[in-house]
Amino acid sequence: MNIMLFFKHPIAAIKSVSTNRRRLLGLFLLGLLVLANACIDPELARTLHLNNRYVPPIWHMDGQWLHLLGTDHLGRDVLARLLAGAKTSLIVGVFSAMLATTGGVFFGVLLGYLGGGAALMGRFILAVHLAMPALVIMLLMVWFFGDSLLWVVCIIAFIHLPWFLSISQKLTPELIAQDFLSAAVCGRLSIFQIFIREVLPNLLPVIVSLFALEVTAAILTEATLSYLGVGVRGEAASWGGMIADAQSVIIFRPWLTILPALCLFLLSISILCCVRPQRVWKASAL
Amino acid sequence: MIKRLALFAAQRCVLAVLVVLLVSFMTYMVVDVTTDANEAIAGEWVVISHGVETSALSGYREWLFHAIQGSFGESLLWNRSVMSVIEQHLATTLWLTSAALVGALLFSTMLVMTSYLLSNALFSRVLIMVCMVFHALPAFTLGLILIWIFSYKLDWLPASGTLDWHSFILPVLALAFALTPRLVLVMDVTLKQVLSAGFVLQLRSCGVHGWRLWVDHIVVNLLPALLSVVSIQAVHLLTGAVVTESVFSMNGLGRLTLESVVSGDVNMIVALAVLFAVAAVSVDLVVNLLIFAISPHAETRGNLLP
Amino acid sequence: MCIAKRLMRRSLMLSCVLLMCAYQAQAAVTVRVGLLKELTTLDRNYATVNESLVLSQLTDDGLIYIDPRTLNYEPLLAERYFFKSPTELIVTIRKGVRFHSGALLTADDVVYSLKWAASNEGRTHRRHMLQTWFKSAHVIAPYQVSVRLKYDYPLVLRDLAISVPIRRQGVYQQGGVIDRGAQAFMLDGLGPYRITSFEPGNRILLERFTDYYRDSRKYLGNIDRFEFKMFSNSASMLLAVEHGDVDWSYRLPLDISEFLRALQGMTLVNGTSMRITFLTLGVTGNQRIQEPVLDLLARQAINHAINREVLVRYMLGTGSQTIDAACHPQQLGCPASVKHYDYDVEKARALLAKSSWNRAQELNVWAYQNRHLAEVIVADLKAIGLNVRLRYVSLATLNQARIQGLVQAYIGSWGSGGTPDAAAIANAHWFMESPRNLLNSEGLSARVVAAQSHSDPELRTRQYRDIFSDIADQAYWVPLATVPARYLIADWLSFVPSRDGIARLYEMTDTRSHVND
């Protein structure tokens, strides 16, 4: 979807979305998820029914209508937990991507504008970031600071920020070079206005595509962290945690592993569907 | 030429050392903050710098002093020197990661070449879609699915442990599948760019075809971009190794990292972080030297070091 | 021609049969043991998990031996022993006993092992308990050792049987440097089996020690080799079992037991043990703990908040029963009835409201095994309004956290080494110096020492009754339930579970084999 079109002619932009079937599908899935989450009582995901442990889903012989997708090792309804996990994933994905994007773009453009030594520093930061074992740092910080959603969001954003920083830093100089020329000629716009009017809009399409990729990456990172036991776990549902809990019984209760994995997959795909794939991959090759 | 290469290599080495030092410093600080090593009751805990430290900075200095001599301290969990524990776990991870990288490179090359040779637009799109699908699956999910299919349903391969080469097949596959999508996508994009470049058309019109075109000209232009992607993937490889080793219960450095973090084994964590940093930086160094040797004027996009 | 051919054919058949017989006679019987804990050391001195005890039964011999049929103490490495006085034990060591390395056992080795196990320098995992009664040990004659006790400790023979593995003199001090890991990877023991290979966390290979002394009281079966396979989760072990790669296992979680029952060629056997599981609560007044701890009303509230019946029925399975006292009902001295806290959520909420515990304060409950049980307990605590966080860690991490004073409460289990005596659990948990003690009370510690300072069973029973009644009244613990032993045994193996729950694998016999020992 053309972002600039959205700002200038919202209705036309929405119409353009509806003509693309793939994007529609993606948005539809996401909408369904949000709606379902709003309808389900969160208590359902937390109530234990120890006399009803490991009830199989409805398509099994012993399935019950009360628990459509069955129950887990403590008798909690799987469908409710999946939706609660969706909430976790979405919150972590969207917010950490927003944080990483805002911070990264801001500092990246700044460094790109300053140029020279600052640019070198920016590249050095990226080098250190890539060399540093991000997973180790993440594990440590989440283990220490606690497994609340807030901390997980901040830590994932912190780890992914340099990526946005480097990309925006690389793209800025070319844009600035052109625009300074025209501004110098016209002599009417301040630097800040140049940023807002010219640099950012040209940067945005790439950033938006990367944003989608980043949301997916953040969701998968959160799932990995909770799978490893370091992160949102236990009562607060998370798909990665559910998969870890179910791993010991994967042989005869595979649905407990497959369902959260499927949800992870569907969520990532539906987010990726909302942007043009070619642009996404081209941007990620940077 | 050699002189330029040597100069370039020297520059890179200096930068690499700086990066590793900085990484070790940052890791040490983070570890120090998160594990409260200072508050341990003396005598029961072997404090990180072989003595009672007064501040994090002095602790880091002592640690660095010992590290340069090759001693990373004693592991709290294993009651042995950190280096000996790492040595025991190193082989598994090396085998896993190198096999997975080779596998991923083979897969992606095969897929991209097939796509190019077939020149079928549908196949191309399906390939991209399949890669997107695999990209959306985290590494541990792939591993679990493989376990379920091959260990349980088909009963062909073992699901865990590192007893013999059989037990390496599934983890290597899982890790390779996790790495392939990005490689395929980058290769695809780069290949299209190179093939549509002006110089290729020129060469073709001069009568240079087939193998000669490929080997002498195209590959040489492809390699820099590919190699730099490989160096970045090396970093993802380590993360993937941690997850894969946990899923398949392999006794490698990845799982060791996880256990050390969860147990607060300070010496081990810092030593492992430094080891990973050194590995990442050396891979990048080698890759950069190769790129420089192949085509000194190549654009090194997505590079590790500035 | 024909005769020659017939002769040749017959001799060929005969040689084949002979070869087959020879092969049968030489075919080594290997039993593959599946463990759900990953052992990183072979040395019993530096591991407390039950799995290391099972391994140690094969590789180490102590001075004394507990006969599984009678639960009496018999001499093992000791030829005979007698009490010169209530505080002095004279032990005569057997002659001609060899270590796996070939060295002969001497009295110096015994004294060294005793001193090392109880010393601060050794930092062994059982030194706190040993230090409470062990005074000194000397060689008084070649092959005679005198062990001096601080008081008339009734469990001295039991400690000598399972807490002090005998090692070669000087083995932990190589070249003047203390090396506590000296026996972690290569074990030089005295037991009927010796280690041939060890991959930490992965696999241990053991083989029959051919020079094992013949006068040993250990009843040995006919197994030639053991292979201990360690699995990090029950799914991999189950896959291995289905594959036929595991012949014996124990301590199986309830979740997979139902499926194991359905397996062909394996039998699930229930057994008794002295193991109980409980929630230990940190107590106000304990200076060692750095985090906020619970006062009496809060502790009593927690006791009322946990639904023990449900835990027993759904999480622990048949053979388990709820307990009120902080000991196993079968242990000498364990009182039959102490203050009972019934499951009453309203009462728990009321008590919590009256207590001085700040509801917003986070209570960290630590656990290291049986995660599902821990989650149910945490859910019960949350239901009365506590802000609980479950810290599920490895045992080594919990040990360190306890030393640092970070643990406010933890879920533990204790098998007492299979000893039917309350001292075995009381001294481990209520001594001042014990790392498992979250109470830190001098008074209670002194009473526990007093109850094990003499051998009068009636007086001891009375003393323990007072101790455990006080513990229940003050709600220092939430005793949950007894934990049944569950074994998975291949049909061709004959293994009789012992009453004390200690798995003595050397007794196993292969019922298919024609070769008798």
Image (spheres, coloured by chain):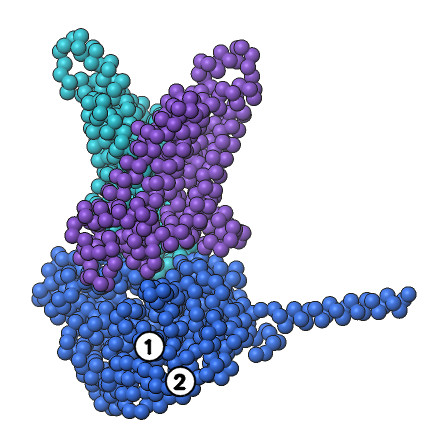
Chain colours: A cyan, B purple, C blue
Q: Chain of mark 2?
A: C
Sort mark 1 into few (<14), some (14-19) or many (20+) by Cα contacts within 10 Å.
Answer: many
Q: Quadrant of residue A12?
A: top left
Q: Is residue A199 visible?
A: yes
Q: Chain of mark 1?
A: C
Which residue bears the numbered disc 1? Answer: C114
Mark number for residue C102?
A: none
Sort mark 2 into few (<14), some (14-19) or many (20+) by Cα contacts within 10 Å.
Answer: few
Contact? badges 2 and 1 (CB < 8 Å): no
Q: Quadrant of the C terminus of chain A?
A: top left
Q: Residue furthest top?
A: A185
* Residue at 25% in and 18% down: A175
- Residue B182 on image: x %, y %: 40, 33
* Residue at 39% in and 78% down: C62
Callout in the foreground (2, 1): 2
Is residue B171 found left or right of A121 in the rendered image?
right
- Residue A243 on image: x %, y %: 36, 51
| Local secondary structure at mark 2 | loop
Q: Nearer the viewer, residue B98 or B73?
A: B73
Q: Residue furthest right?
A: C1
Q: Is residue C270 visible?
A: no
- Please determine whether, in this image, residue A80 is positioned above or below residue C400: above
Q: Quadrant of the N terminus of chain A?
A: top left
Is residue B35 found left or right of B300 in the rendered image?
left
Marks 2 and 1: same chain? yes
Which residue bears the numbered disc 2? Answer: C142
- Residue A265 on image: x %, y %: 37, 41
In the image, what residue type sits under mark 2? Pro
Give the tally of numbered discs: 2
- Residue A69 on image: x %, y %: 37, 51
